[in-house]
Amino acid sequence: MARKVLMMLNARYPADIRVKKEAGALIRAGVEVHLLSLRGKSDAAQEVVDGIHVHRIRAGVNNYELAFWDVVMSVYQVHPKFKKAARAILEEEKISVVHVHDLPLAATALSLKKSLRLTVVVDFHENYPDALRTWFQWKTNLVARLKNFLFLNPERWSRFEALASKQADRIIAVVDEMKVRLIREHGLPAEKIVVVTNTEDKSFADQTLDASIYASLQGKFIVTYSGGVGPHRGVDVAIQAMELLREFPQIHLAIVGSGSPAVMQRLQAMKEEASLSNVHFMGYQSFQYFFSIMHFANVNIIPHQSNGHTDNTVPHKLFQGMMAGRPLLVSSSAPLKRIVEACHSGLVFEAGSPGDCAAKIKALYKDPELCAQLGANGRRATLEGNLNWEATQEELIALYKTLLPA
């Protein structure tokens, strides 16, 4: 029998870097990977992308339709369109293992488990119930706020998480702290959970360098935040820190990435109200420039708030920043603090504290030798040590050797 797996993702593909890396690792290990995902207006219903057999369904092509299906999953747990499509693929391809990405589609996969005799792996990208407590804090649309309050209820999703955790055959956690939480809160046996964290492939360091990325900031001491922007990311704390660093006109904050209109408007308003000329919004940038963005920064900052969501996940940019050979400045969010202190690859400031953030930026600005040493430590830990995807993927491959023996 062919070694096959069906992955399920409540998003469009390609987009999710974690899905791409996990699927790629399994394909290289001899597993045929099928992926059921959302279909955008211009997406093909089926195609092979990155070696993955991608199957797409129409289940929301705009924010209003996606919100409708969010409500359906929150109320009924099971997504009827995903369930119907998954059943068809599983039966046609004779697949016995389902790998569901994150909590929202877990119940859908589990609803097919008994009738199709499936093995179900639930891959928790994050602490989804606690994420719901933070994602929508800055929402200004009253209808969206009401929808989130009524239907995307964290307590309801916590109950779903407990049920899915117990019914799943195996669980993948994104970070050690997540594994500890699942064991503590749901009484799961440790051996049921495998940690597959968000390290980066070494090839990230091979991206072509583009020194023009900060042309407008030439000669400045650049502190860079890169990636998605939201209430939990702490970018507002970094902006407030820059207000405290006015006496150092050489220090500038570059914000590379974007968020919802409400989030970006809030941050832009903070900059304008404080009349900050040392804060720059560079917007969305293609992934092909991210190594340059991080390498040509003086410091890469990850200022996450510390809460139930951020303390149970870890961003790819932590490991990307270390590969770039520049010092990190991270908040005291548990996984960030643990990894940076273990690798001696940066400084840690108290999460949510603009004052401590500013003090740590100033310390790095005044000590080039410290910056160089911290950057070298991070590069060594990722490119010569085991904090890279080449090492991490072995945990995933080992799991699938037990689920799909050759």
Image (spheres, helix red, strand yellow):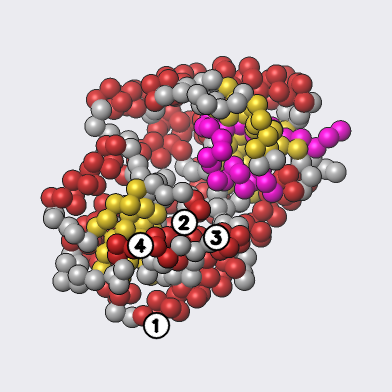
Task: Please name which of the two marks, 2 or 4, marks the residue nearer to the observer.
Answer: 4
Q: CA distance from mark 2 to mark 3?
A: 8 Å
Looking at the rendered structure, the kind of residue marked 4 is Tyr
Find the magenta span and give its range: 1-25
User: Looking at this view, is 215 or 123 the one in front?
Assistant: 215
Callout 4: SS: helix
Mark 1: give few (<14), some (14-19) or many (20+) Cα within 10 Å. few
The residue drawn where x is 33% and y is 74% is 364
Task: Reply yes or no: does residue 174 show up in magenta.
Answer: no
Task: Please name which of the two marks, 1 or 2, marks the residue nearer to the observer.
Answer: 2
User: Looking at this view, is 268 or 158 the one in front?
Assistant: 268
Q: CA distance from mark 1 to mark 4?
A: 22 Å
Looking at the rendered structure, the kind of residue marked 3 is Gln
Residue 78 visible here: no
Question: Mark 3 or 4 closer to N-term?
Answer: 3
| Whether residue 21 is situated above or below residue 345 in the rendered picture | above
* Residue position for label 4: 214
Tell me the quadrant of the picture where the C terminus can be found: top right
| Whether residue 53 is situated above or below residue 146 in the rendered picture | below
* Residue position for label 2: 290
Callout 1: SS: helix
Mark 4: give few (<14), some (14-19) or many (20+) Cα within 10 Å. some
Residue 369 numbered tag = 1
Mark 2: give few (<14), some (14-19) or many (20+) Cα within 10 Å. many
The residue drawn where x is 60% and y is 68% is 383
| Whether residue 224 is situated above or below residue 51 in the rendered picture | below
The residue drawn where x is 76% and y is 30% is 96
